[in-house]
Amino acid sequence: MSSDPLEGGFFRRNYVREPVLLADSVRARRRLARWFWATKVGDRNAFAVRMERLFGIDYPTGFEGYVHDDFWRDEDITDVLSGITLWLQMSHLRADALAEVRAILTEEALRYRIDAKGGVHFFIDEEFERSIQSTVAGLGSPRFIAANHALENALSNLDVAKQSGKGLISGTFEAVESAFLTIISPTSHDRINLKAIDDHLKPKLLNHFSGYPEANDKVDRLLETFKAWVKSAHPFRHGAGFDQIHEAPLDLAIASAAQGLSFLRLFSAL
């Protein structure tokens, strides 16, 4: 669901959105450094020592001791996210500190969430995050530029400010359709349909899996799964009457998108 611009809201908050939720952000790191200094409770040097003891990092130092800004700016994102949890807990999980750091992750479109005890987690889960990363890597070829762009648009629907299960499903379908048309080209087909799947995708898959026993049976089963996914996505790809519920539940949309990501990875290998 898209959110309306807030009266009196900052332009960047109202209108500037990242195309997808990010794994890292320079702006977020700057804000985390300022958040760290603004939180009055907690011994900052003790924080540095504990980061070294717990995670084995080489905490940045200078002539006058620990350089905390360099930690938030330069350390690996996994250590920065762990640092958020440690600092929240050293600050006794103060409500204002927790609320501010949650706002930073949301406003800077990072794909993480923070639980009530200060733990940082992937916005969906680790498996879905890894699936996104491997799919994006597979679509790195210039021939998949349209599919990659469509996937970015699809994933933007996970943004908490404008979350849409329907958008996630339809955008993922567009990405899959673009990749599908790329790998079966040149043909007269301009969309995914049963004839295009059987006439053009099936031969490519049979060739790809020709070295495996019973390849024909494996491909037939795979195509049945693909056809079922295509059918399941169709209700969310078009408009609906006023009295119809058309927004997809987020858990359903994530399940559909996860399947779509797997087909994208397969197509990028063909």
Image: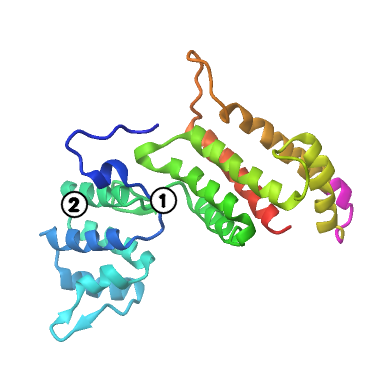
- Against 23, residue 257 (above or below) is above
Furthest toward the top, the residue is 243
**Are discs 2 and 1 less than 8 Å apart at CB?**
no
| Front residue (pair 222, 242) | 242
Would residue 263 appear left or right of 167 to someone viewing this image?
right
Q: Is residue 53 visible?
A: yes
Q: Position of residue 155 (x, y in %)?
A: 48, 46
Q: Which residue is tagged 1?
A: 21
Image location of residue 10, percent across then percent down: 21, 44
Task: State the residue in front, 80 or 135.
Answer: 135
Residue at coordinates 65% horizontally, 54% vertically from top-left? 265
Which residue is denoted by mark 2 in the rendering?
97
Q: Residues within 10 Å of mark 1 (few under 14, many from 20)?
A: many
Q: Residues within 10 Å of mark 2 (few under 14, many from 20)?
A: many
Q: Amino acid at mark 1?
A: Leu
Q: Which residues are magenta?
A: 211-218
Q: Residue at x 69, y 53 (%)?
A: 267
Is residue 77 left or right of 72 when viewed as pictured?
Answer: right
Q: Secondary structure under badge 2?
A: helix
